[in-house]
Image (cartoon, rainbow, N blue to C red):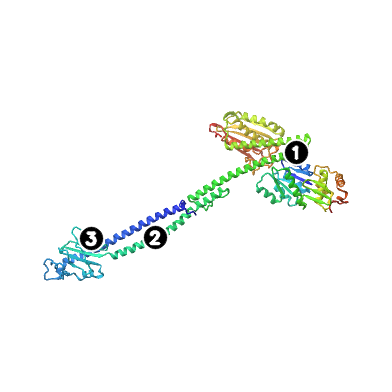
Amino acid sequence: MKLFPQSLRWRLQAWYGLLLLIVLSAFGFTAHHLEKVERLRNVDNDLQQHLALVVNELRAGPQRDDNASANRPPQRPQEPGGPPGPNLRFDSQVDAMFTEGNRYYYMVWLRDEAPVARSANAPREVPRPQRTEASTRDREGQLREKFLFAAPVDCVLVGRSMLDEEGALFFNATLLAGVGCGLFLISLIGGGWFIARAIQPIEKITRTAARIAEGDLSQRIPQDNDQSELGQLSAALNQTFARLEDAFSLQQRFTADAAHELRTPLTVLLIQAQTTLARERTVEDYRDTLQVCERTAERMKKLLEALLQLARLDAREEPLQQTSFDVTKTASECLELVRPMALERGVALHLEGTSTTLLGDTDRLAQVITNLLTNALQHTPKGGTVTVRVSRDDTSALIEVSDSGQGIAEKDLPHIFERFYRADQARTSAAGRTGLGLSIALAIVEAHGGSLTVKSGMGQGSTFCVHLPALVDKMRLL
Amino acid sequence: MRLLIVEDEPDLLRSLARALREEGYAVDTAEDGEDGLYKATSTGYDAIVLDGMLPIMDGWALLKELRKTKQTPVLMLTARDRSADRVRGLDIGADDYVVKPFDLAELLARLRAIIRRGSKQSSAKIKINAVEINTASRVILLAGEEVILTAREYSLVEYLALHRGELVTRTVLYEHLFDENDSSLSNLLDVHISNVRKKLGHEFITTRRGHGYSIGA
């Protein structure tokens, strides 16, 4: 795996980590803040209760203190500066609350600046609250105080230290941060593993594509029944690779076959020339040699022309001529062209069909018919017949070329339009066959948007059918 | 030396046969695999020139069948220079191959090499007493002087020399010196033998009456 910043995996990991960090931090800060608010609210509630208690106690204090003077107004507290007034005594329960644990303290003021009463644990300096202040205040960062301006005294204040709370808060925050960091690390590693797994197919694809680029077209992306998008991509790419390989191997085979077909006549030329030149010959010898050479060169020329024509058809270089013509008339011209060959082989030729007009490339369609006729003649024994039938319906014209030959074996049927394929394994030489006639016919018919099919069985002869779209404005142009 | 050429392309077959006959070989021909296999198994050839692509039975199948019974040296002609095609032939038992198009000189040299290998003779020069036979240039020296022999006479000497010390019967000599087109007049062989003796000395070829001939025994 690559770890440089451009790597998809690296970037995914970085973004994922960043997002995780933001989410975890936000969660942590929110939790911390909520806890802080909650704790403050509890403290404030407690302070409020204590304040209420003190105030209640102050209001109730004198009656309970001295039953004889039950109805006199609250006693004026002791003079400022004195010790906490003896007459400001509280219920023992309340007193206990303010001494035990030393957490809460209270102060009581009359009109003076100095307090008239205070609990023993109250801090030394507590400024007298002002009436303009809010009823709650924080002091020195660690004290929280609540006060009330209420009768029977002027101001009552209850406070406590926040050190405990802040300690707990800090401890919780640390815990939260620790757990958060742990979670972050675990998620980062887990996420990294998951990303690596998710990216694995991409790396497989890259490796395979690289091997294919190096020239090994048989490579495929390994597929483990993956239905994800990447699995589908792999499947699609594998199909593409397979088609590429097919096309490539077809091309390679064609090139090899073409070379092969040219090698044999070339060998003849070389051997003839080298043998003949080895010593002095008679004029007849030279003439014989030259005749063989000429025949061989003619064959090479024919083969080259066929190869070039196929190459041009493949490349769609030359546009088809579009002329209106009578197929039946063209077929009869083709029959005349092959008649000498038919006579030589003792095969009868027939033409059936009435005038049928088509739009297309006359010369090339004539070549299709001629190629099919030549092929039929080559496979028909002496005394047989070769028949051309032309018919049409609303949408297409049909040209059939049938022979009474031995037919084509089932194993050969799928291959007979392949270039250089020969059912009988016989080579070109006989009758100047190039092995490309049917391939050329197929290429031309397909260029016209038509189809070329064959029906055959051993011992039943063969019928080649050319379907051509009759209305040619739909015709696919080269 | 008698050769069989199996090749379905008539012009190539004729050209090769002509070239090899002019080199003094007796040459039989076959145009398809079936005929080729029949001839190859029924006759003792010194070497077979075999094309890979043949009708009815291809060259590789022919070779496979042939190797079940005979070890005749085989030179394959292949039109494809892909190593897979060459390896295939060599694996089945071909002794060598040439890729079309080839030079006649190369074909002849390779043929001589596989024929020599077939008779356990590794050098192109064979020396028997005062006679030196150069199978590459087809020149025979007697005590350093070149002796002019006809193609048939040369073939006779070469065949016996390649099988030096062995008794070679008249039948075998006929089989290896004459091809299917030669007339089989039996005194033809005697004429060649007597001509060779005139040129290279009477004792060069030993006659074992009723059995055959040998040299360098």
The earlier-in-sequence mark between 2 and 1 is 2
Residue located beneath label 3 in the image: A136
Quadrant of the rendered image containing residue A157: bottom left
Going by the numbered disc 1, the residue's amino acid type is Leu
Mark 2 vs mark 3, CA separation in Å: 37 Å
Q: Residues within 10 Å of mark 2 (few under 14, many from 20)?
A: some
In this image, A14 relative to A153: left or right? right
Type of amino acid under label 3: Thr
Protein chain holding label 2: A
Q: Which mark is residue A181?
A: 2
Left or right of A106 on screen, residue A293: right
Q: Chain of mark 1?
A: A
Report whether A249 appears left or right of A297: left
Label 2 SS: helix
Residue type at numbered disc 2: Cys
- Tell me if residue B112 comes above or below residue A380 in the rendering: below
For label 3, the SS is strand
